[in-house]
Image (tube, rainbow, N blue to C red):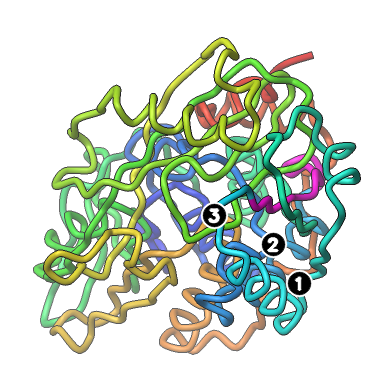
Amino acid sequence: METDVLVVGGGATGVGVARDLAMRGVDVTLAERGGLSAGTTGRSHGVLHSGARYAESDPDGAAECIEENRVLRRIAADCVAETGGLFVSLAGDDDGYFDRKLDACREVGIDAGEIDALRARLSVGGLAGDLERAMQVPDGVVYPSRLVAATADDARGHGADVRTNAPIEAVHVADGTATGATVGGTRIDAEAVVNATGAWAGECAALAGVDLRMRPTRGVMVAVEYPTLGPVLNRCRDPADGDIVVPHRDRAVLGTTSVAVEDPDEFPQGAWEVDRVIEECAAMLPGLADAPVLDTYWGVRPLYEPAAAGEDERGISRDFALLDHADEGVDRFYSIVGGKLTTHRAMAEATADRVCADLDVAEPCRTAEEPLAAAGDPDRLDDLVAEFDARSPADADVVGSD
């Protein structure tokens, strides 16, 4: 079969690229090796970042987060929850760090403000007794299964062909140009191929003869029974293990760790990580220490920039990069790597812009303005999650529940 663009990878970024291209009138096929959102997207903690987490260390990335945060609230309806967020500083935490983060948030346009301890305790019952300072930010929660399924459905509604259970087996290159790929036993000829496989981008690129060095890291999420959290809760300190608690319907998701892995499919899952995350998160919210554990799951971050010798993997950039492999001898083959769930739409727009420029397609991006077709219908969303086999542990208590 033939298509204009073949997108490989059915996480948030891949379906976002398919939707964007389809809305511009490009004939696009998306292939995912299993069900949609089965990789990093569906195994995240599901925070809709305001950018506050990155404001002092990466102001450009923070500004992008708050912009995309607002976009997703407009276009994704029941794929997100407007919970708000709270950064808390406990006894012994760096007071100067709190001030730098607050100033940085304001500088990049994030609506952040310090609140007194009483107001913080009204916002989150059971906060630690040694709470010293608190800051409100516009964080939220993403339901990844719904978001990916709704985006894939919208792409299909604009003419895209969405194929699940279609693992990539070969990338075809002729005279220095990608000409398509074989997925799920079917050869698909294409004018361009987009590698949106996340932590597996190196393996996909290798099929085209391209050396793409990834440095994936694993992180554990622990879902506990805790239905009364309210806002997303963040520890106001340098990023570390166990510094975020995410509210869901009848549970809270605690995260996370960061440990380098060699293989994103096969890696050790240490019980120490679970214990450490619970212990650290309970420093903010002591009731978490005794909350029943409902689930544990690991995700793998698609970090592409190798760490220097001895560097903590948390220091690797979380920014995204769009790689045009023409410079490496394979034209019309692109990889989109890195990034965050919150910024997936912007990543997709950047990718579609590059592909369309090479294909002489002049249509502009409209994905930030037009809502996802099914986003306001929770029952329809959950039907789409089932259809695309997109259910994931990140939102298991929300999708398909009464």
* Mark 2 → mark 1, Cα distance in angstroms: 7 Å
Q: Residue at x 67, y 24 (%)?
A: 399
Q: Which mark is residue 50?
A: 2
Q: Which residues are magenta?
A: 77-89
User: Of the residues tagged 1 and 3, which is closer to the observer?
Assistant: 1
Q: Is residue 321 left or right of residue 138?
A: left
Q: Residue at x 79, y 40 (%)?
A: 78
Label 3 near label 1: C-beta < 8 Å? no
Q: Is residue 371 left or right of residue 269?
A: right
Sequence order check: which comes first, mark 1 or mark 3?
1
Amino acid under disc 2 = Ser
Q: Residue at x 28, y 49 (%)?
A: 217
According to the image, label 3 marks what residue? Answer: 341
Circle 1 — which element?
loop
* Image coords of residue 208 (percent x, y): 14, 66
Q: Which mark is residue 110?
A: 1
Q: Is residue 306 left or right of residue 319?
A: left
Label 1 near label 2: C-beta < 8 Å? yes
* Mark 1 → mark 3, Cα distance in angstroms: 18 Å
Sequence order check: which comes first, mark 3 or mark 2?
2
Residue 80 on the magenta span: yes
Query: The C terminus appears in which quarter of the rendering?
Result: top right
Amino acid under disc 3 = Leu
Dot 3, how many residues are within 10 Å of its Cα: few (below 14), some (14-19), or many (20+)?
A: many
Dot 1, how many residues are within 10 Å of its Cα: few (below 14), some (14-19), or many (20+)?
A: many
